[in-house]
Image: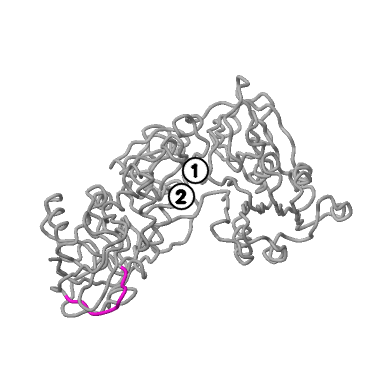
């Protein structure tokens, strides 16, 4: 007979951890007497991070006494108290390898439904004083699970737990957890999990993403996008490419054509991807690594990158003023998941300034392979002299009978207004203008430009009825950080860490334009990035969830602990890795 042993609650609190403040409700303590369980939580309970915990689908967390006994043996500890694992209900019975998603249980006056396993989260490691705990919960197949409250009511420790219905899929909590986090992911089991109506939206979305990927390990692309025979980047590290042509596109944008030294065709890049170029140290300055979108025809024998000369841009200035035809540049393989999705539906391509570069590759792909698709080309520039690719895009759009063009000059010159050469609007490309265009709600949209521009247009497109999931953006520099539960702090530009520099391998954060030497005190590449205020994304910090996965452009890393499932070739999990040699990260 299953039994409710303890009811545990705790309100969120601020906890100091690794020099930062974490807002968390992981500390739960037992309560006596009856306690009301409501739709969102147990009375007196709360969660600090509602993105990953709590809410209607995750109202009550359950953990088993048998797992307590397991961890006491495994960790050699005898200091556990009920609520130790952040659970609301400590129970006797209900093991993870028997309870199924969708099972329903009655406790006291309340009725519950199992919705998902526990979310892997670093905070259980904080509570346990064991950083490996998120990984251990998965690898030992003892995650615990969440309940949805179907009928509110009072519960009390000591009450019997009565099973009243079985989950329709017959898939246990342990199986569903392993299906997401452990190697394998058999597609037929993923499909079966998706047929369970009680499965939470978050887990459902993760499984749908799995099914959207190509079948077979060798066919699945990671962040590298362009894959070689083993499914990783088209080539490892950096290889030399020869500059075969240079073309001025506007007052500030220059295109460079790059080809293999031996003249052999280069691996095809997907429309929207980018190249990472390394400029070695020399009389012109220190070594620099930068990424530039590919703007040429996808599948061409040569690559074209287009570079805007920034007022204080060391790399762009060097490329504009020092590089000549016949020179060689070191380049990593094409990467990026900001790519044009196939399909027959309408497409919106919206850019500002040099943000047109990845969209131009998409436009070329549409002109070559799908000329019947409806295309809206929306672009903003300062004036005609700054309008890169004006003639090229006009010719491509003329060959697309279903296309519509809106060009905005924020500061048009008199000749821009007179000749009307593709110029249709004076002023900026704004959300108000987009709202008047009557864009189809079923369109896929691709945006590239300054952050404020993309934020503005994203709001306009969702206001026009487009699905937020169909709006794709490309960020020029470092992407947005994801640090769950960490109290906000004033943003700082990336910088070298405090203290004496290390003597280990050089670690380059490409998007942040920073190279620093490694030293073991950092612990992991993630901790080094945090010490440099490089924006990072993470959740478990132990190699389980893959939130921290980052493109490994060159170099080699070692893992401690070993991740539950290794990342794709050409990627690294920075939360549990260290550089073995000079390393370049797409971060």
Q: Position of residue 505 (x, y in %)?
A: 40, 34
Q: Where is residue 382 in the image (x, y as percent from the top left)?
A: 75, 54
What residue sits right under mark 1 in the picture? 514
Looking at this rendering, what residue extends furthest in the right direction? 418
Residue occupying the point 45% across, 38% down: 552
Is mark 2 in CB contact (under 8 Å) with mark 1? yes
The answer to which of 83 and 535 lies nearer the viewer is 83
Viewport quadrant of the N terminus: bottom left
- Looking at the image, residue 143 lies above or below residue 560: below
Q: Does the magenta stretch include residue 321?
A: no
Q: Residue furthest top?
A: 262
Q: Count residues near mark 2 (Cα–Cα under 10 Å), then give few for <14, some for 14-19, many for 20+.
A: many
Element type at mark 1: strand
Q: Which mark is residue 585?
A: none
Look at the image and give the residue range highlighted in magenta: 148-156
Residue 50 appears anywhere in the view: yes
Q: From the viewer's side, name the closer residue of 466 and 393.
A: 466
Answer left or right for 553 relative to 20.
right
Magenta stretch, main secondary structure class: strand
User: Mark 2: which secondary structure?
Assistant: loop
Coordinates of residue 166 in the picture (x, y in percent):
26, 63
Q: For residue 570, which quarter of the picture?
A: top left
Q: Disc 2 or 1, which lies upstream in sequence?
A: 1
For the point 14% across and 69% down, the residue is 5
Q: Could you say which quadrant of the image residue 129 lies in?
A: bottom left
State the image quarter where residue 31 is shown: bottom left
Tell me the residue that label 2 is attached to. Answer: 534
- Residue closest to the eye, 311 or 472: 472
Res 18 seen here: no
* Horizontal side, residue 306 vs residue 194: left or right: right
């Amino acid at each position: 007979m299953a039994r409710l042993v303890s009811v545990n609650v705790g309100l969120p609190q601020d906890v100091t951890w690794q020099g930062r403040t974490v807002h968390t409700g992981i500390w739960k303590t037992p309560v006596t007497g009856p306690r009301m369980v409501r739709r969102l939580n147990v009375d007196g309970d709360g969660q600090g991070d509602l993105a990953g915990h709590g809410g209607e689908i995750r109202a009550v967390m359950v953990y088993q006494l048998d797992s307590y006994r397991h961890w006491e043996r495994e960790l050699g500890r005898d200091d556990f108290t009920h609520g130790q694992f952040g659970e609301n209900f400590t129970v006797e019975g209900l093991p993870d390898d028997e309870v199924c998603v969708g099972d329903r249980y009655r406790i006291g006056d309340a009725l519950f439904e199992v919705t998902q396993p526990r979310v892997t989260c670093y905070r259980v490691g904080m509570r346990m004083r064991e950083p490996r705990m998120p990984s251990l919960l998965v690898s030992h197949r003892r995650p615990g699970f969440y309940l949805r409250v179907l009928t509110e009511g009072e519960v009390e420790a000591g009450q019997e737990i009565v099973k009243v219905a079985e989950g329709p899929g017959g898939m246990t909590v342990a199986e569903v957890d392993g299906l997401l986090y452990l190697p394998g992911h058999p597609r037929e089991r993923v499909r079966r999990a998706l047929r369970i109506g009680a499965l939470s939206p978050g887990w459902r979305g993760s499984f749908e993403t799995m099914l959207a990927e190509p079948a077979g390990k060798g066919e699945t692309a990671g962040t590298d996008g362009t894959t070689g025979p083993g499914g990783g980047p088209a080539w490892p590290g950096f290889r030399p490419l020869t500059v075969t042509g240079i073309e001025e596109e506007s007052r500030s944008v220059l295109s460079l054509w790059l080809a293999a030294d031996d003249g052999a065709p280069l691996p095809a890049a997907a429309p929207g991807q980018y190249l990472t170029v390394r400029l070695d140290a020399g009389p012109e300055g220190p070594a620099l690594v930068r990424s530039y979108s590919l703007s040429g025809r996808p599948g061409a024998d040569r690559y074209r990158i287009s570079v805007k000369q920034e007022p204080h841009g060391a790399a762009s200035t060097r490329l504009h003023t020092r590089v000549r035809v016949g020179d060689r540049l070191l380049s990593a393989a094409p990467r990026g998941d900001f790519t044009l999705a196939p399909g027959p539906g309408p497409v919106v391509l919206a850019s500002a300034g040099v943000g047109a570069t990845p969209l131009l590759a998409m436009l070329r792909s549409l002109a070559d392979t799908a000329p019947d698709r409806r295309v809206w080309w929306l672009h903003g520039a300062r004036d005609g002299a700054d309008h890169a690719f004006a003639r090229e895009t006009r010719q491509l759009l003329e060959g697309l009978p279903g296309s519509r063009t809106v060009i905005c000059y924020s500061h048009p010159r008199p000749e821009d207004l007179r000749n009307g050469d593709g110029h249709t609007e004076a002023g900026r490309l704004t959300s108000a203008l987009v709202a008047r265009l009557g864009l189809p709600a079923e369109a896929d949209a691709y945006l590239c430009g300054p952050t404020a521009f993309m934020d503005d247009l994203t709001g306009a497109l969702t206001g026009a009825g487009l699905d937020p999931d169909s709006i794709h953006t490309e960020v020029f520099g470092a992407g947005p950080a994801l640090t769950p539960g960490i109290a906000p702090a004033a943003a700082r530009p990336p910088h070298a860490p405090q203290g004496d520099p290390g003597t280990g391998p050089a670690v380059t954060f490409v998007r942040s334009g920073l190279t620093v030497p490694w030293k073991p005190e950092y612990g992991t590449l993630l901790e080094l990035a945090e010490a440099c205020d490089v924006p990072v994304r993470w959740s478990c910090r132990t190699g389980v969830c893959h939130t921290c996965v980052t493109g490994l452009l060159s170099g080699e890393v070692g893992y401690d602990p070993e991740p539950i499932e290794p990342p794709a070739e050409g990627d690294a999990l920075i939360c549990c890795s260290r550089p073995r040699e000079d390393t370049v990260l797409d971060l």
